[in-house]
Amino acid sequence: MIKRIASCLLALILIFTLAGCANAPQPQTPDSQPTQGQAEPTQASVTEHSDAPQTDAPQTVAPKESSAPTGENEPEESGSDTLVVYFSRTGEQYKVGVIDNGNTAIVAEMIGDRTGADLWEVMPANDHYPMTYSELLDVAKRELNENARPAYAGEVLDLSQYNTIFIGAPVWWGDWPMIMYTFFEQNADAFAGKLLIPFSTHEGSGLSGFDRKLSSACPNSTVGTGLAVRGSDCQNKQESVRETVNKWLAGSGY
Ligand SMILES: Cc1cc2nc3c(=O)[nH]c(=O)nc-3n(C[C@H](O)[C@H](O)[C@H](O)COP(=O)(O)O)c2cc1C
């Protein structure tokens, strides 16, 4: 009899424990506010992201096609002393399905609207990035593990007219996409003495230390206060994102 009661109790404990696990909140690094010194996302948040259920992903995705130009990739110069450099992907994206304007591109355009800055998009020289989310995860992970420096399209930029450069990208595996390090390293000398202001779009990892990593890659530049924006908000809550962006820019004197 005692044995039977004990095994019933054991079974009940097991059921409650399993139910508790299933409902446990997923570990996520919260959105970072526009402050410096954002803590590195935990490995858990990065891993969790990749394993996140993809219920929002569409059944069909756009056909693979290159979104990068093969030739010229020059900024549209307006005489402004401010430049926005960004990397962003179209195609299938986490939480938002197939998009034809990348999340980071949307923030970059908002910065351009407010500041009158020139815009320049970092595009892969030979666009090897897949248009499906799961394949893109794999390619990005491989590049991170190999500390790769994928080439970008276009000539070396003439940065002499710019004093302030906003630099934005999606968080990929808790870091800048590796192509951005190519860009930083190739332009670190030209960045010297300039103010660099990072921004990210993400789905939980915040700024992911973009500011600190940018500062290490470009030690002779000043790095300003960064901004992190949820990628899905860029597609679905544009007015509130614009408000956030404008408020942040006001803090930097724009
Ligand atoms: C390869 C890959 C890796 C990602 N890794 C992370 C991550 O570590 N943390 C996070 O919060 N979001 C991650 N995301 C989500 C993107 O940062 C987010 O969807 C972003 O807004 C995409 O911007 P884009 O449309 O400008 O490319 C990842 C997305 C991709 C495609």
Image: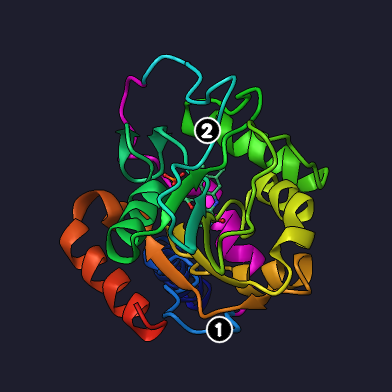
Q: Say which quadrant the C terminus sits in.
A: bottom left
| Kind of residue at badge 1 | Gln
Q: Residue at position x 66%, y 27% from top?
A: 125
Q: Which residue is mark 2?
A: 134
Residue 102 visible (yes or no): yes
Q: Which residue is mark 1?
A: 36
- Upstream in the sequence, badge 1 or badge 2? 1
Above or below residue 213? Residue 159 is: above
Q: Residue at position x 35%, y 57% from top?
A: 112
> Where's residue 169, x and y in %?
52, 53
> Where's residue 151, x and y in %?
73, 34
Please state the extent of the stretch shown in magenta in the rendering. Answer: 39-61
| Kind of residue at badge 2 | Ser
> Where's residue 113, x and y in %?
28, 58
Question: What is the total number of numbered labels drawn onto the structure image?
Answer: 2
From the image, give the main secondary structure of the stretch colored magenta.
loop
Could you say which is closer to the camera, residue 54 or residue 198?
198
Could you say which is closer to the camera, residue 4 or residue 125?
125
Furthest residue toward left: 239
